[in-house]
Amino acid sequence: MLKVREIVEELRVFERNKVPFEVKVLGIATCIQMSSVRRTARVLSLASSSI
């Protein structure tokens, strides 16, 4: 079974590199688990528009 990081790397989802790749992957995993963009933004201390 593939890990979230491997899937994201394979699909080349992100174009810009302003936020570290690990934070982006953590954001995806958290969003999938919590199913809430606002909660994910709060956990990662980011604006919800950046997620």
Image (cartoon, rainbow, N blue to C red):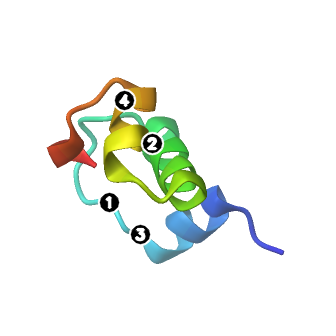
Mark 2 or 3, nearer chain start: 3
**Image point 52% across, 65% down: which residue?**
8
Q: Which part of the image, by quadrant, shows the N terminus? A: bottom right
Q: Are marks 1 and 4 in contact (CB under 8 Å)?
A: no
Mark 4, residue position? 42
Towards the viewer: 28 or 38: 38
Q: Nearer the viewer, mark 4 or mark 3?
A: 4
Secondary element type, mark 4: helix
**Residue type (three-letter) at the residue carrying disc 1:** Phe
Mark 1, residue position? 14
Mark 1 or 4, nearer chain start: 1
Mark 3, residue position? 12
Secondary element type, mark 3: loop
Side (left or right) of 14 relative to 18:
right
Q: Residues within 10 Å of mark 4 (few under 14, many from 20)?
A: few
Q: Residues within 10 Å of mark 1 (few under 14, many from 20)?
A: few
The x, y position of residue 28, in whole percent, is: 48, 55
Q: Residues within 10 Å of mark 2 (few under 14, many from 20)?
A: some
Mark 4 or 2, nearer chain start: 2
Mark 2, residue position? 21
Secondary element type, mark 1: loop
Q: Are marks 1 and 2 in contact (CB under 8 Å)?
A: yes
**Image point 42% across, 41% down: which residue?**
40
Mark 1 or 2, nearer chain start: 1
Q: Nearer the viewer, mark 4 or mark 2?
A: 4
Query: Residue 23 — which label?
Result: none
